[in-house]
Image (tube, helix red, strand yellow):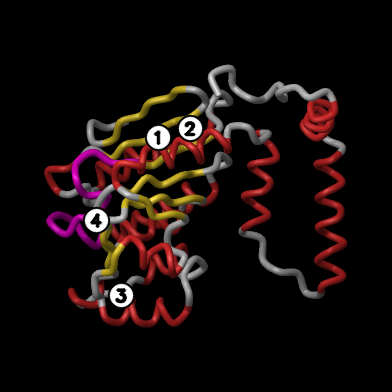
Amino acid sequence: MTQLVRYEVAGGVATLTMDSHHNRNALSAELMAGLLDGIARASADSGVRVLVLSHAGSVFCSGVDLKGGAADSAASLPEILVALVECPKPVVARIGGPARAGGLGLIGAADIAVAAEDATFAFTEVRIGVIPAVISATVLPRIAPRAAAELFLTGEVFTGPRAADIGLVTACVPADRLDETVAGYTSALVRGAPDALRATKELLRRPAGPSLRADLDELTTLSVRHFTSDEGREGIASFRERRTPDWVPPAA
């Protein structure tokens, strides 16, 4: 871990905090290395069930660091996005301030994103002569096509409520309810079985099959495998016995 990223674990929830507020949490090489280390650490820890991506200071993330090695930083961004998307634990983004350019790629890569109402967003790339190419991989599947065309092409700033309306974030809440709302999501997520959560994340990014019948055949096989797994049996037994499944952390 680097000094620009803090890592903490409590109650099955790992919190990865970008702490580079001197440059508005820009995605420098050092900060991205810290993020990769933290994601890998959370992914490998069986005691971690959920990863929260948060930030220190008033800005969530201002995008790729333009002051030093911008092209190199942009080339490293895909590694971060892939690590977040493929993290076997659900990822929750906590957005308490502005997000720009590459920062929106991080939000798109999260499974759940919660923003404060006064947070602002913008795809600023066209205004500096570049394009939002890399982040489009995680953002475009989230947002409405008309909104994507408008916001990618204009680079205009938009608000937290608009971000929720177009699907960029899951929820938009008053700033004083941000942490409470994030905690509500993490409390729900830690109750999921670890392997089922991992497989559900894979399911969510699974492309449609060549035909409905073929797709359903494959999905049925996947479903049966999980119903008959150790987790599936424990989950069904705990439901019948009205008890907490054995995978729920004690502090949850």
Q: Position of residue 63 (x, y in %)?
A: 26, 58
Q: Of the residues tagged 4 and 3, which is closer to the observer?
A: 4
Circle 3: element type: loop
Residue 194 or residue 178, whichever sits in front: 178
Q: Is residue 248 left or right of residue 25?
A: right
Q: Amino acid at mark 1?
A: Gly
Q: Amino acid at mark 2?
A: Ala
Q: Of the residues tagged 4 and 2, which is closer to the observer?
A: 4
Which residue in the structure is indicated by mark 4?
98
Asked if residue 205 is positioned above or below residue 229 in the image, the reply reads: below
> Which residue lies at the image location 71% right of the left edge and 21% below the top edge?
246
Can residue 66 be found in the magenta stretch?
A: yes
Q: Quadrant of the N terminus?
A: top left
Q: Considering only order in the chain, which callout, 1 or 4, is on the residue closer to the N terminus?
A: 1
> Which residue lies at the image location 35% right of the left edge and 81% below the top edge?
150
Q: Considering only order in the chain, which callout, 3 or 4, is on the residue closer to the N terminus?
A: 4
Q: Considering only order in the chain, which callout, 3 or 1, is on the residue closer to the N terminus?
A: 1
Which residue in the structure is indicated by mark 1?
38
Q: Which residues are magenta?
A: 54-73
Spatial CA span between label 4 and label 1 = 22 Å
